Amino acid sequence: MTELILSAATLLTLAGVGSAWHFRRKRDRAERQAELLRRHADLLTRQLLAAEQCVGYVAATVVPAAVGGRPGRGGPGGELVVPPHLDGTQLAEQLRALPGAVASAVEQVRAQERTAAAQAADQVRQDVERQVAQVRQESVGVARAAVRGFANNVVARAAMLGRTVSQGVRRHVSDEAYATLVEIDHLAQQMLLTASGYAVLAGDKLSRRWPATTLTDIVQAAMGRIEGYERIKHPEMGSVAVEGRAVEAVVHAFAVLLDNALRYSPPSASVHVSLEQGHHACFLIVDDAGLRMDDERLLWASDVMSGKQRNDITRLGAHPQTGLRVASVLAEDYGFRVELTAPNIYQGTRAMLVLPKNLLTTPTPAEPVASPVPSDPAAEPELPAAPATTTASGLTVRRRSAAPAVSRRTAEPPAAEPGRPAVAAAWAEGSRHGRQGEPSQTSAGHDAAHDEGH
């Protein structure tokens, strides 16, 4: 019995010891687990604090730096420095990538803004250019209309003056007023040349009509519209004629070239006109011995003749240079060319009128042409058998009978005095056709006061 009791006590003791050990182990395990949980909680707390700090840093530094276009503070490569507590976490990787993502997003937004701004600016620029072009077109139209109206008014009045002078020349061919009237007639021709040049630039067309005319008559008609024609030397070129539809344009364009050559060569030097005939065209050439055009001026003339610098009448400036512009318009309208080169054989400038074959014809037989320089009628008695000559306006110059003794002059006048019959006939011979019908609107010309010259 005693042994049984001892055995039971022993069993109970062993069971208690086992239970105590079991519960102790369980307690120890729980304590270790609690410690682990506490440490993990501490880690999570530190990580959370670190994440908050990083987010605050990103918000306070990285994003403003990216928006402002400045590199943010960070580690090598510009990436964000992540606290050690976050190493190995997904948050750390995302935080390291955040500055780049923010900068990329900001740059994308900026690119979109720049594109939108550029598009808006381009649209505004196009609108402004369109409005400026419209205003310029309207201003050019108004200027053209004003210049055309003024030029046509001057042309009409100059034509009336020419008719009046023509009547006066017929009435006073035998007295002292003749020389003055011829000089006035020459000035009227220059006025017509200048005014009609502006009218052409303003959009008008030529109205004076000619029959087919030889190059000799064309050169002399051009001489009749400029000053200093006495210095022009030209050969006989009656073997070539220009179709009637282009004569007026060729006369005026050639007058421009002759005027330039005279203006920019020495007063004592001659201007030489020559003719070269090619297979496809004839070349009417003007050579002067003046100041040759430099390369810059030749380039400008080339631009004018090509049309780059001739159409806008509002850009002629305070001293309009219209001569070559008018010649360029006429050349384009009638199918010939004007070319300028330098230096020529005289170290001056060569101007060339290129007349294609389709503008040329064979001259028709005509009555014999009178001598271009008759004797002074004040010094000689009337010679009825002598051939007649003409003035610039196409009027017949009759030799007068012996003047009364009171008005007879004893000395011959200077042969080169402007306006006298002896000189007037030199340029008048070829222009006699030009005044058969007065211009109703315009004939081409240039600005005699401010031509471009060489």
Image: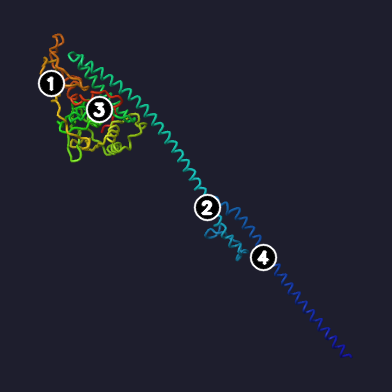
For the residue pair 272 and 336, the one nearer the viewer reads as: 336
Q: Mark on residue 387?
A: 1
Pick the quarter of the image with the N terminus.
bottom right
Q: In the picture, residue 233 is in which quadrant?
A: top left
- Classed neighbour count for the residue bearing mark 3: other residues with Cα under 10 Å, few (<14), some (14–19), many (≥20): some
Q: Sequence-wise, which precedes: disc 3 or disc 4?
A: 4
Kindly identify the amino acid type of the residue bearing the numbered disc 3: Arg
Please name the residue that numbered disc 3 is placed on: 209
Residue depth check, mark 1 versus mark 2: number of the one nearer the observer: 1
Instruction: Find residue 282 and report its image quarter.
Output: top left
Q: Nearer the viewer, mark 2 or mark 3?
A: 3
Contact? badges 1 and 2 (CB < 8 Å): no
Q: Is residue 156 visible?
A: yes
Calculate the distance from the C-alpha at mark 3 to the C-alpha at mark 4.
109 Å
Labels 2 and 3: the sequence-earlier one: 2
Q: Which color scheme is applied?
A: rainbow
The residue that label 4 is drawn on is 43
Give amino acid for label 1: Pro
